[in-house]
Amino acid sequence: MTDSHDKIRVHCEVNGQAVSFEAYPMERLLDALRVQMELTGTKEGCGEGECGACSIEMDGSLVNSCLIPVLQAEGAQIRTIEGVAHSAQLSALQQAFLTHGGAQCGICTPGMILAATSLLERNKDPTDEEIREGLSGNLCRCTGYTKIFESVVEACRTRKRGQDA
Amino acid sequence: MRAFVPDYQMEAPPTLAAALQRMASEPSAWKPFAGGTDLMVLLEAGKLPHRKFLSIWKIPDLRGIAASSTHVALGALTTYSEVRRDELLGREFPLLARAAAETGSIATQNRGTLGGNIANASPAADTPPALLVYDAELELVSPSGTRVVPFHGFWKGYKQLSLHEDELIRAIRLPRGTYGWMHFYRKVGARRAQAISKVCFAGTARMEGGKIGDLRIALGSVAPVVLRATETEQALRGARPTPIVIRAAQQTLAREIAPINDIRSTAHYRLRVAQNLLAEFCEIISA
Amino acid sequence: MGNLHIGKSVQRKEGREKVTGRARYVDDIKFPGMIHGVTARSPMARGKIREIRFGPGIPWDEFTIVTAKDIPGKNCIALLIEDQPCLVDSVVNHPEEAVVLLAHPDKYLLEEARRALQFDIDPLPPVFTLEDSLAQKQIIWGEDNVFKSYQVEQGNIDSAWSLADFIVEGEYETGAQEQLYIEPQGMIAQASPSDGVTVWGSLQCPYYVHKALVRLFGLPKEQVRVVQTETGGGFGGKEEYPSMIAGHAALLAWKSGKPVKMIYDRAEDMVATTKRHPSRTRHRTGVMRDGKLIAMEIDFTLDGGAYETLSPVVLSRGTIHAAGPYSCPNVRIRSRAVATNTPPQGAFRGFGAPQSVFALERHLDRVAEAVGISPEELRRRNFVREGETLSVGQVLQEKVQMGKLLDRALELSGYHEKRARFGRENRNNVIKRGIGFASFLHGAGFTGSGEEYLASEASMTVSQEGKVQVLAGSTEMGQGTNTVFAQIAAEALKLDCEQIEILQPDTSLVPNSGPTVASRTTMIVGKLVETAALTIQKSLFDAGLIRPDYTQTEFPNACRQYIERFGELKALVKYQHPKDLHWDDQRYRGDAYGAYAWAAYVVEVCVDTRTAEIRVEDFVAVQEVGKVINPVLAAGQIEGGVAQGIGYALYENVVWQDGRMANGQMTNYIMPTAVDVPKIRVYFEELPYVRGPAGAKGIGELPLDGTAPAIANAIANATGIDVKEIPLTPEKLMELLENLHD
């Protein structure tokens, strides 16, 4: 352990709100979200970028927040699970997860919903293969993926019927 | 998180010149940090020896895909997702797009960069085999200027780059000339997504009346570096890929590669798979 | 009259919290003044600690430091026995064994301190394999390294061999498997001599943790409180292990006087906690020309790791399931669980049965081949029927229809057509396809007299507003406990599910309903919930406050009046062991389980012989499970279990180096992703079980039993390889393919 260095102040936008927080420059964005910003919806499952439980959207792209040093979040637009629902109304995807059993223990669910949300933003009408590929960076131990897949398919159908984004 | 995070410093120089200057100011102290998909994993495991990093993630000069009549130049910070989305790359350099699609997960592809991948110099990297068969060149920049070197040979040994202390990888250049060649890429990992490769094979070939006019073969995860299999190429160049020719080429390949036993796989498995992928390549190009 | 809620896919009770990220898991919770704790562990498998060295550069006086000497009660994690220390006293018996605990407010500094601790250990010779343990190369536990052994006998097997037309032998091995819940182990503790001990955390069995803490601290029961937080997966990995991490967090809290949070990172969780017991099974089977089984001799051994933990019970279930749903007049099963110097193995969904069923179902395909009949015909000729006995002598009372289940599974999967077609298409093709199946059963609830011993309880209270509270020690960890209990209670009371609240399991509030394991929660505890609801209903009837045809709107008023008159409206129900179930613990014979689920799984695989990669292309899971209370939740259990079984068969390989898991990262310990698992097709048959709530049986573990052997049989069909071992990694398969051609 050599000499500690100073913290920095990071300014970014999280779920539409401007935030600023102090952290060491290479602290993980995941920790800043969960601790400094007290947004505990984003989870740590592996700390290696393998499980996707820490998935968020940063500047429109799905990323693993456990692999992002906070310095690189300066000026970024971030969306976490807390920003997916529109105040009280669940997104079509969240609703589909409820009706189709997409969440069991729920620990992978925030990341899974971010991944699926990101997929549907880029691809309004994904094939089955594209859905599975879009989710392949998010590990789920409970569901075997079948009902998560069905939830995403249902959300696509709902969105095609014109109800909500 | 097994690292003592307060010990680590990071700065974000706004321009390429500023980054180079910072690196030169304290030789070998400041390491470039792009998307972080390799370095952050090491940090979390407590295995990242360096302490000072320059975030180059936002430097404009390192981004962008530009095409001239002779080359396509990809900024070092081109992400795998950007590679996948680029139409020109998909048409002319399909193996690169394939390799990018097989790298990690979507989240990794959004942050992982070609330059970072090259600088990390893992022998299991997925895009370098494609870069090698496309005769990629690297544009390296330092305070004293720019030089262009072939990517083939840039990795001198396991995790050893021919990169000077004051240099950054600025771009990867792909000569446009393999249009019309046949392309083959296959990565074999432990599962179908998000897997570190056990064997990775990239091959291109120009066929002339049933014979192999010219070809390139590169493999990952079977040597300390991602390997251009030049001897195996030689064994096939000008030949008709009959079963006998293929078998002889497989023997040459066995001598040329040096797979090991490690936590993911065995030397024997890697050897067999490499040989079988070579056969698959030959069958596809002669179909 | 139709059902109100039973058989309906009522939405998960805590679903909204989960899809919005508002559900609070232990690491989401913080207390004022809370500090963090970590565990420093032995790098060596076996030895005596000579010295603990505190390295330089760390302000050690800022730290809370706990060793075995600080333990107020007994230095043990009380479970079946008390052989496992909470902290190493002087002898280390496995790599990653906990030696020193540290706490500090700064997480980063804490990790530095952990790194700065060095242990000087004088090595002792370790035992790493099941074989070496059996051979007693060293005695590392007890007098003979054997935690437990069983012997099951039926008929007269020694004289049966001479009658057999064919005798088929085989030896089968299964590897360790990591539970890999996506939420790692975690606990928060508050403790002091004056206030006692309270822990909050990710766990399946609050009363197991309670018992362990009582013993560790030497406190009276009332001074220990265990609260379950939202749990991100358990699968058995949080059955007994949480007692250890709870003990650690509580010891730090006790010594520091502050709340202590202890969360494992993935690397620590993988290498230090329990896994599925590795196994070796030897089969010797005597069979007649017509396919009738006449003799089954089974030798079943489990590697239990360094301490006993739950090995006797895992062994028990594995032993009882070893001969499957088949009728055979002469059976001998000898089984034992032995010690090795590896981190203790523990509970994982299936609990011994996946190991023995893998061996059996793979073996029976080989037996069929020897006799010259098809695998399905061999099964049909031997399926146990109502009135016949299982290997432990249980006379089946259920209207079991294994033949029908198998037929249905074979039809839904297109088995016969595919088998014929693949046989043709595989010739001269580097891609080989195959289809195989497994037929099996899984006993629900604790074995034999286990449920009687558990003496589970559940209670129910109703408020003046007619809101019903279910109080049970059963935990929700994704399998749907909260929702199913609500459905059962709402059905019995003729209310909406929203009127039923399931109380968060807190040992100061809820009774001991037994552990959330063994596929017992719906069947056993759900029955208690149902009975409690009916008891409350009867109280209202008997008080003349409702009539049999009462409506939901009348309910609150009736409750209010009842409470005004009698003070409270509640019911406490205790488990009643069915009088017609008898189990002999000494002879290990009798009615092993109250009910069984029955299943036939069919798997289609595709093998690329160039790379030995195996892909599961189609999966059909047919099972009879009694009444399905919630179809979406039930199917979810099967689908998730099948995915874990696919991992068990093909992907999940623990690489051992000197007794330690060397690939303890998610990068290198491979579980399937969304592109590795096909759509899993699930079909239920329902023969209501008279003792189950609304007729339900247990299903949680069932899918782990049949998935891996069905895959192995499919690979054997595709390639001609005699699969004897899982996980069948591509490396192993490549070698087997090459040997085939030699």
Image: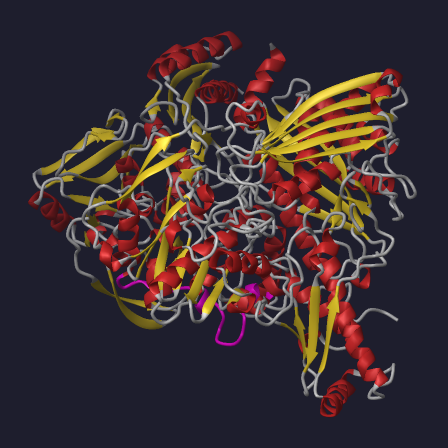
Residue C719 versus residue C440: which sits nearer the camera?
A: C440
Where, by quadrant of the figure, is residue B72 drawn? top left
Q: Going by the image, does C265 lie left or right of A143?
A: left
Q: Does the magenta stretch include residue A156?
A: no
x and y percentages locating residue B12 in the rendered image = 19, 54
In this rendering, the answer to whether B211 lies above or below C383 is: above
The quadrant in which residue C177 appears is top right
Residue B57 spot, x, y in % from top left: 25, 51
Total tally of numbered discs in the picture: 0
Q: How is the image coloured?
A: secondary structure
Segment colored magenta: A74-95
Up-down relation of residue B284 to residue C352 (above or below): above
Q: Indicate the quadrant containing the C terminus of chain C: top left, top right, bottom left or bottom right.
A: top right
Residue B204 at least partly seen: yes
Identified at 36% across, 34% down, the residue is B125
- Quadrant in which the N terminus of chain C is drawn: bottom right
Q: Which residue lies furthest to the right in this view?
A: C387
Is C378 placed left or right of C304 in the picture?
A: right
Q: Residue B123, how many percent across, how many down? A: 34, 29
Q: In this view, does A132 lie to the left or right of C724?
A: left
B178 over A91 or under it: above or below: above
The answer to which quarter of the image holds residue C393 is top right
B282 or C368, nearer to the observer? C368
Magenta span contains residue A88: yes
**Residue C434 in view here:** no
